[in-house]
Amino acid sequence: MQTNLRKWAMAAAVAAIGSVSAALPAAASEVVGYYPGWKSDAFAVTAANVDAGKLTMALYAFVDLCWDGKHGNPEPSVNLVAPCQEPLNGALAFRDEAADGANLRALVALKKNHPKFKVVVSVGGWDWSNRFSNVADSAEARANFIASSLRLMRRYGLDGIDIDWEYPTEAGVPCVAGETCARPQDKQNFITLARELRAAFDAAGEKDRKHYVITIAAGGNANYINDAGGGGWIKELAKSLDWINIMAYDFHMPWEKNSGHHAALYADAKDPVAASAFHASGAVERYLEAGIAADKLVLGVPFYGYGWKGCAPGADGDGQYQACDGGATGGVNGGNAYGFSHLLKQGMLTPSFEGGNGYRRYWNVSARVPYLYNAREQIWISYEDQASLKEKARYIKRQGLRGAMFWELSADGEHQLLRTLSEAMR
């Protein structure tokens, strides 16, 4: 069956290119949110936690890829390797088959009262992108991936696949000795994988009388978009996709020496690296310049922030763009990530969304994002709030983009951010 599928998919790939555009409805205001499957014990799939009435799609994060009978990532920062449920190279693998299966069924059950709501599984992610290069480079593994994806769609009543490969030609998590996690031909292999997946999904969709979605989570920087042809690869890849979710965040991170906004909408001339276009609108412009249609772009927004410690006040007294001592430790689980819920629970934000507990809220007029600074403790926090989400929703509409994506549902205290984003996207 897999051999026949591979032969058929490869033969039909060229004819299938472009079919996705014919099958799709007119561009919609997508509101796409990731559900973190590994957090389901504390953040269960319920109507209260996953408001399907305000979402158009939930991306279930994450499922992995099998290779040599196992899945996971042996790199010490991840340190997770387990047997595959389906021991074929390229087959999809659950972190926990019972829990992930139950979560997917619960998400799909939400469609009963919200028939336009879609449930899609996201493959890979930061920790689990280490096998994409191997799978995309092998015709047999690509066929196994496609067949396994279709089985998963039909088993659970899902609506598609989101490929979160971080990143083609440049693995984000360092590869352990003796392994291959990136190849020069990754981007061309990604095109081949997407073409074959599109052909198979279109054929299955005709039989199942539904459209199976294919999306990707994509980097917003020039390294991701460009190739030897100046970005020609991403335009070719997009032909097989329903849309591209741009991860327009993490532009500045706490391991940098200076504080900086991790999801600025526009450039700020005061940012020491402003010329690098490390901001959301700059990422969108890169895709548009590469020939991607606006209605195939979904702008990613963060429901979390980052904190820096040891940041001097600076001339303006707000700690912005100042030299710091590294990542703060008052975030979630003692780290430097500050989910919106965490800021509220810790009193760093008040119920009126102003600063609290020694923190003052500031607003960057150029970048259109908020930030917090505690002058006594010298902690500086970049984050997203209702005001910045409204700015990004206006930008999305003005540019004619397909919608917004966010990471992730559990970081949103009582749906304040989702409610704001959903209403702003109407």
Image (spheres, grey):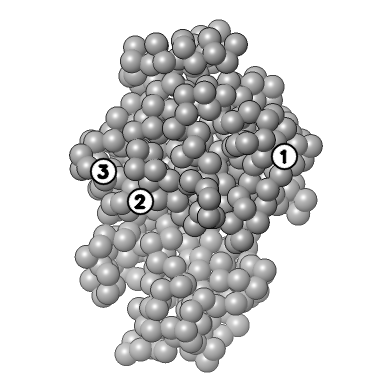
In the image: residue 235, left or right of residue 253: left
Is 195 situated left or right of 44 in this image?
A: left
Residue under the point 71% across and 44% down: 82
Residue farthest to the top, as pictured: 207
Which residue is label 3 attached to?
227
Crowding at dot 3, Cα within 10 Å, few <14 / some 14-19 / many 20+, comes out as: some
Q: Nearer the viewer, mark 1 or mark 2?
A: 1
Picture coordinates of residue 296, whole percent (x, y) = 35, 34
Mark 1 vs mark 2, CA separation in Å: 33 Å
**Label 2 environment density (alpha carbons within 10 Å; few <14, some 14–19, many ≥20):** many
Q: Are marks 1 and 2 in contact (CB under 8 Å)?
A: no
Q: Please say if the residues under marks 3 and 1 sit with CB atoms less than 8 Å apart.
A: no
Q: Residue at x 57, y 51 (%)?
A: 127
Mark 3 vs mark 2: which is more N-terminal? 2
On the rendered structure, is 68 left or right of 244?
Answer: right
Give the structural element (helix, strand or loop) at label 1. strand
> Residue beneath label 2, please?
220
Q: Position of residue 95 (x, y in %)?
A: 70, 43
Which is closer to the viewer, label 3 or label 1? 1
Residue at image point 40% right, 89% down: 313
Marked residue nearer the N-terminal end (3 or 1): 1
Q: Can see residue 22? A: no
What residue is disc 1 on?
83
Answer with mark 1 or mark 2, whichever residue precedes in sequence: 1
Q: Residues within 10 Å of mark 1 (few under 14, many from 20)?
A: some
Residue 188, x across and y down, in percent: 34, 33
Secondary element at tag 2: loop
Identified at 56% across, 85% down, the residue is 358
Q: Is residue 381 above or below residue 223?
A: below
Three-letter residue code for mark 2 = Gly
